[in-house]
Image (cartoon, helix red, strand yellow):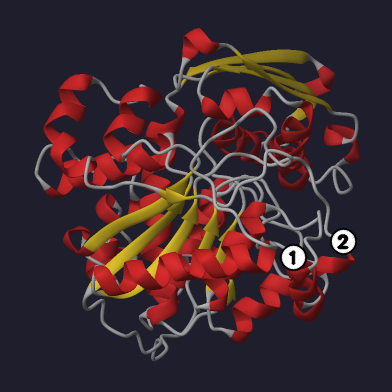
Amino acid sequence: MAAVGKGRAIAPAEGRLGVLLPGMGAVATTFIAGVHAVRSGRARPIGSLTQMGTIRLGKRTENRVPRIAELVPLASLEDVVFGGWDIYRDNAYEAARKAGVLQGEHLQPLREFLETITPWPAVFDSAYVKRLHGENVKIGKNKRDLAEQLGDDIDRFRKEERLSRLVMVWCGSTEIYKEAREVHSTLAKFEKGLEENDPDIAPSMIYAYAAIKRGIPYANGAPNLSADVPALVDLARKMAAPIAGKDFKTGQTLMKTILAPGFKARLLGLAGWYSTNILGNRDGEVLDDPESFKTKEVSKLGVLEHILQPHLYPELYGKIHHVVRINYYPPRGDNKEGWDNIDIFGWMGYPMQIKVDFLCRDSILAAPIVLDLALFLDLAARSGMSGVQEWLSFYFKSPMTAAGLYPEHDLFIQLMKLKNTLRHLRGEELITHLGLEYYD
C-alpha cells in the first residue's frame, strides 16, 4: 500500500467563484437553476460527486469515510456566481423555459433569480455550427479581436461581481469536425492564426484561448477540439491553468463505460454493439448536420476500442461491429432515448444478446457534471496543478491526456484515479485494493 505523503499546499476557497458558461442553452440553464434550487433548499444535488460523494481513507478497518467536500476545500455553492454567452438574447429563465428540461413547478420559484442572468453577445460563426443562427453575436475585425472582446467580458464580470476566482465550462453546441493542423502546433502560430482569421480556429478555441490566457481553468463539454491542441495545452501550462475535456459523459456512452468493463472483466466476447439515439433539443438539431455529427461520432466510437483493447484480445474483440446513430426527433425534446443492441458470446462461442433502452434526460445528467468540473478545476488551480487534468476523465466521453498516451475510458478506473488524486492532494494513502494486510 502506498505510503502517506505530505500532500499539496492548497489555497483556501475564499471569496466568490465565477463560473463562465459559453452556451447558455439547456445544459447551462439546468445547471444554474439546479444550483440555485439546492442552495435555496428546494432540491438535492443528486448526481454530484462534490456535493454527495464520499471517499474512503486508510484501511477498511479504520472506518474513515468522509464526504469529499470534508476532505478537500471546495468552493461553497453560496459563493458561486454565473455568467456566460449565447447567440440568443433570452435570459436564463426564458432560455430554460424554452429548453423544456425543467417543469414549470420547479422553474417558477427560481424565475426572479434566473431573470437576472442575461447572456453576453457570443463569438459564433454558423460555418462551424450550421443548424443554428442567432442575433446576439459579436462582430470583430479578426479572431484576435473577438478573443479580446471575450477577455473584456471576463474582466468586467470579475470586477462587477467582486470575484476572487473564475472557471470556464464550455456548454455550447458541437462544432463541425476538425483535426489539429499546423496552426494549432505552437502558441505563436495559433496567435498568428487569430490575426489572420485562420478557418481552422473554431469559436470554441477562441473561448478557450481567452480563458487560458488569463490563467482561468477551462473544461470542454463538447467533442470539439477546443483546448485539446498543442498550442493551448502549452499555454495552459505556461499560465498555470488546469484544463479538461472532452464531451460530457451522460447517456448512452455512460452506459457503455459501465457495461463494457464488465464484459472485459469476465472475458466475454463482443461481436457487435449497435447504438441509436433520438433527441429533439438544440443538440439534436445541431447533430442533424453531418459535419457536426462526425465530431460526435468520433468521440463516441473511441470508447469501446480503448476499454476492450482488441489488440490484446483479438479473439474476443478483434471484429466488433460498432455503429452509432443519432436522429433528430423534435417531439422528444431534451428527453433523449438511447437504444443499444449488444451481441456478446461466451463459453464455446455461444451467442447472447443484451438490449438497453435508456430513456434519459440529457441535461439532467449533464448539470451535475458542470458543477463538479467547476469546483474540481477551481480546486486544481488552488492546488498549483496546471495543464491537462486527466484525473477528471471520469466526466468525459473523449478524455484529454498527455501527448502519446491513450485515454482511460473504464468508468471504475476513472473513479479510482479521481479519488486517488484527492487522497494524494491531502497526503492520504492511495487505495490499491490489494488488501493482503488484512490476512497477515
Q: Does residue 439 appear anywhere in the picture?
A: no
Tell me the residue at 60%/31% (across/down).
Answer: 132
Q: Callout 2, which amino acid? A: Arg
For residue 166, which quarter of the picture?
bottom left
Mark 1, secondary structure of its residue: loop
Q: Position of residue 299 (x, y in %)?
A: 71, 42
Say which of 179 and 390 sits in front: 179
Q: Does residue 116 appear anywhere in the picture?
A: yes
Circle 2 residues within 10 Å: few <14, some 14–19, many ≥20: few
Mark 2, secondary structure of its residue: loop
In the image, is residue 269 above or below residue 68?
above
Say which of 304 and 379 sits in front: 379
Q: Callout 1, which amino acid? A: Val
Say which of 141 and 387 sits in front: 141
Q: Position of residue 337 (x, y in %)?
A: 53, 16
Tell me the residue at 53%/12% (across/down).
Answer: 330
Name the residue that disc number 1 marks.
229
Q: Position of residue 332 (x, y in %)?
A: 48, 12
In the image, is residue 49 above or below residue 132?
below
Q: Quadrant of the C terminus?
A: bottom left
For residue 222, which quarter of the picture?
top right
Marks 1 and 2, how far apart at CA: 9 Å
Q: Position of residue 135 (x, y in %)?
A: 51, 37
Name the residue that disc number 2 marks.
181
In the image, is residue 316 above or below residue 273?
below
Among the two numbered marks 1 and 2 on one chain, the one whose residue lies closer to the N terminus: 2
Tell me the residue at 42%/33% (across/down).
Answer: 26
For residue 357, which quarter of the picture?
top right
Say which of 148 and 208 sits in front: 148
Left or right of 36, for residue 278: right
Mark sitting on residue 263: none
The image shows a total of numbered marks equal to: 2
